[in-house]
Amino acid sequence: MSKESLIKMLETLCQYNNVEITHTFSSNEQPVMTVRCLKHTRTIEVTNLKNNTVKLFDNIEESAETLQLLINENTIV
């Protein structure tokens, strides 16, 4: 997934931050990561389901770069 596509997805999540939308990334049909924009904020929450860690980002570009790394690491399709 390109960085530009990830940025567009994250911007859309934050545009609708008055509702709870969660995007799930899977590998081999197993969820490995979730991404959401915290309600009424522009904070991106990335949850790595493999090790149950949560990272918060206030910068969409930085969160897109991190997502891209995690996607490549997990070969998510």
Image: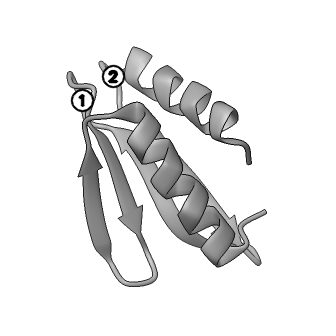
Q: Tell me the quarter of the image containing the C terminus.
A: bottom right
Q: Position of residue 72 (x, y in %)?
A: 67, 68
Instruction: Please identify the residue farthest to the left as the structure is shown.
Output: 40
Q: Describe residue 54's horizontal placement relative to residue 23 as left or right.
A: left
Identify the amino acid type marked 2: Asn
Q: What is the count of numbered marks?
A: 2
Q: Describe residue 35's horizontal placement relative to residue 27 as left or right.
A: left
The circle on residue 70 is: none
Residue positioned 32% across, 34% down in the render: 59
Can I make out residue 21 in this image?
Answer: no
Residue positioned 56% across, 63% down in the render: 69
- Quarter assignment of residue 68: bottom right
Can I make out residue 3 in this image?
Answer: yes
Q: Describe residue 37's horizontal placement relative to residue 30 as left or right.
A: left
The circle on residue 39 is: 1
**31 vs 12: above or below:** below
| Secondary structure under the numbered disc 1 in the rendered image | loop
Callout 1–callout 2 Cβ contact below 8 Å: yes
Residue positioned 49% across, 32% down in the render: 10
The circle on residue 17 is: 2
Label 1 vs 2, first from the N-terminus: 2
Residue nearest the viewer, comparing 48 with 67: 67
Q: Position of residue 56 (x, y in %)?
A: 25, 50
Identify the amino acid type marked 1: Lys
| Secondary structure under the numbered disc 2 in the rendered image | loop
Q: CA distance from mark 1 to mark 2?
A: 5 Å
